[in-house]
Amino acid sequence: MSVRRLAEPALQPKEFSFTPENRAWADKVIARYPQGRQASAVIPVLWRAQEQAGGWLPQKAIEHVAEMLGMARIRVLEVATFYTMFLLSPVGKKAHVQVCGTTPCRLRGADALFEVCARKIHPEPFHISADGNYSWEEVECLGACVNAPMVLIWNDTYEDLTAETFETVLDGFTNGKPAKPGPQNGRHFSAPNGMQTTLTDPSLYAGTNGRDNEGPALTDSDAKKPGTAANVRETAAGKPAT
C-alpha cells in the first residue's frame, strides 16, 4: 500500500485523449472553478479518464489531464498515486475487487476474503485472472467499518461478507447479474444486525401533545445565549424566538 507505481511500459498505451463527449464533460467541470483554479477539477477529470481507459489510469491519461488543467505532470501523478480509487495498472474486464485490509475488517474475517481472491482470481494482487475478467488488490479503510468485512467493486461496496457470500458476489459478475450493493447479510444499511436493542420505548419519541418530541422550546432569552441549539419555535406572541 505504501508504494503505488505506474504500470510497466509494455502495458502502457502509446497515446490517450478524451472522446468529444468526455472532453465536453470535462470542460464543463473545469468551468465551475475560477480562472487560475482549474487544478481543483483534477479528481473528477482523472476519474473520467480512468473510466474511458477501461477502469485504470495509463500514464498518457495522467499527462493528458495535466495538460488540460495547466498542471505539472508530477502534481497530477501525485494525486493519481495517492488515492486508491485510481488504478495504475490494467484491471479485469468484469470486476476489479478492492478488499479492505484495515483492522476492523481484519478482525471480522477479511483474511477469508483474501483467500477467495487468491483462489478465484490470482494468487497475487495486481494480476488479472486467466480469463481476463477479474483482478484484485488490498486497500485501506473503505469507510464502512461497522459493516466489516467489505470490498469495493467499481463504484459499489459489498459489506458484511463471508467467504461464501463473497463468492456469490463474484459469481454474479460472471453471470451478468451482480448482487445488490450494500450488506450481504440482510441488514438495513448500518442498522443493528437483527432487531433494535436500544431506545425501543415509543414514549421516547412522543411529545405531550401526541406529536413527535421536538425537544424543549426556547424562550427569547434562551435563544440569545451563545451556543444555544438551533431548536427555535414561535413564542406565545407569535414571533420567532430568534
Image (cartoon, grey):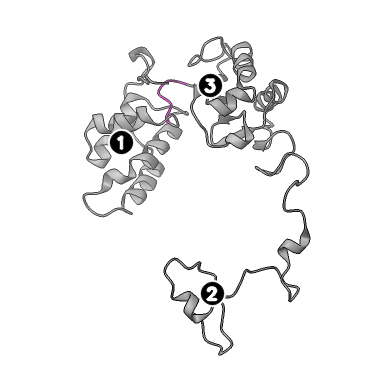
Identified at 50% across, 68% down, the residue is 230
**Mark toward the start of the polypeptide (2 vs 1):** 1
| Residue that carries the numbered disc 3 in the rendered image | 92
The residue segment tinted magenta is: 86-90
Main secondary structure type of the part rendered in magenta: loop
**Residue 199, x across and y down, in percent:** 72, 53
Could you tell me which residue is drawn at 50 percent across and 66 percent down?
A: 229
Lower position in the chain sequence, tag 3 or tag 2: 3
Q: Which amino acid does label 1 sit on?
A: Val
**Mark seen at residue 232:** 2
Q: Mark 1 points at which residue?
A: 65
Q: Which of marks 3 and 2 is in front?
A: 2
Q: Which amino acid does label 3 sit on?
A: Gly
Determine whether the residue tagged by mark 3 lies in a helix, strand or loop. Answer: loop
Percent coordinates x, y for residue 214 in the rendering: 64, 69
- Quadrant in which residue 75 is drawn: top left
Please tell me whether mark 1 sits on a helix, a strand or a loop: helix
- Looking at the image, residue 1 sits to the left or right of residue 94; the answer is left
